[in-house]
Image: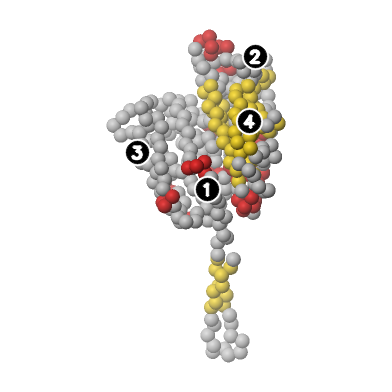
Amino acid sequence: RLPPGHLFARQFELPSARDGDRVVLQLSVTGHGWSMTTDQCGEYCHVVYRLILNGQSIGNVTQFRDDCDSNPINGSVQHGTWWESRNGWCPGSVEPGFFLDVSKWSSSGQNKLEFDVVVWSNHTQRYEAYTDFSGFALGDQASLTVGFSLFTYGSESVKSILQQEHAYTAAEAALRDGSSSPQSLAGPLVVEDEMSGRGGLEAASRVAKLREEARNVRYDFEARAPWYLFNETVEGSPGVEAGAARIRIFDSALVQGATRTVTASISRSAFSERWGQAALQLRLSRPEGLEFDHWDRQASVGLLLRQGGQDARVIVAEPPIGHRRWKLAASEDASAAIPTVDAALA
């Protein structure tokens, strides 16, 4: 029997780390179930996730989304109550999760991560361990979909990321600033209006101001947070201005009851010898000749490296070489031509 508030624990092994290596944890949680559940959990409740690594508390994380009504599609193609705030997600959104640098709490070899939760109670007006009494009696289950991963960054990669002008991904933000979303670690506030699904907790979303396109020809993923929408009809193929190569993984794959999992392999030969970034463009559409409903659906996308990625390595890109032109005037002879010299700048 699990103690109240304790969801699960996982043991895992990390490879041997060298000086300067860093470990980043990615956590993504979405809550589901609400109609007959206690406190409309897990979809509309405010939850604090307590993370414990190797017996040490590494953070109390909130991921409630208070910005669903800011969805750029503005209901044009979205059905249902898309504007209502939710626990960890919004209808039609991508949830890359929260990234946290856990280097000082992790170690080479065996590690143990524990995952506990407390939920804001409308009855007691405080956060406490959750029991779904109403859902148990009325047959409505409150659930959380939890995903977490750990990524090890070599010292050379860390050094390169720290020398950048700014972070281009949420993981890079964690390496530079400790976490991708400091407000997610700020601690929960008192929830003022729980019945409407809107509360005093600030959204634990990765809201970022749009920046100018990267001057060093890197694609700035976080400039599109938190919705990560891309209109190919208007903007063209992603990364085309930076000379990105496009590799098609699959096309018109049907996802339904009998085919819920879609897998595809990518040959190493499809990639160029040297590259610095990889992005996934995913487009969902109605299958031709078939029907679909408008209820919430959730899915995950992942990349599996053979042999656990042991053969993978990061090659830090060299800085781009620019050119500048100078005009050299003749010293004495006014009739002499003025030559132009090209110089390469490292």
Residue receiving disc 1 = 312
C-alpha span from label 3 to label 4: 38 Å
Residue receiving disc 2 = 123
Q: Are marks 3 and 1 in contact (CB under 8 Å)?
A: no
Question: Which residue is painted at 67% across and 38% down in the image?
Answer: 107
Could you tell whether 233 is left or right of 85 in the image? left
Query: Which residue sits furthest left?
Result: 289
Residue receiving disc 4 = 113
| Residue 239 x %, y % | 46, 51
Please report whichever mark, 4 or 2, sits nearer to the chain's N-terminal start: 4
Residue 187 lies in quadrant? top right
Q: Helix, strand, or loop for circle 4?
A: strand
Q: Tell me if I can see residue 213 in this picture.
A: no
Question: Which residue is painted at 70% across and 31% down in the image?
Answer: 56
Residue 9 lies in quadrant? top right
Q: Helix, strand, or loop for circle 1?
A: loop
Question: Which residue is painted at 61% across and 86% down in the image?
Answer: 331
Mark 2 or mark 1, which is nearer to you? 1
C-alpha span from label 3 to label 1: 30 Å
Amino acid at circle 1:
Ala
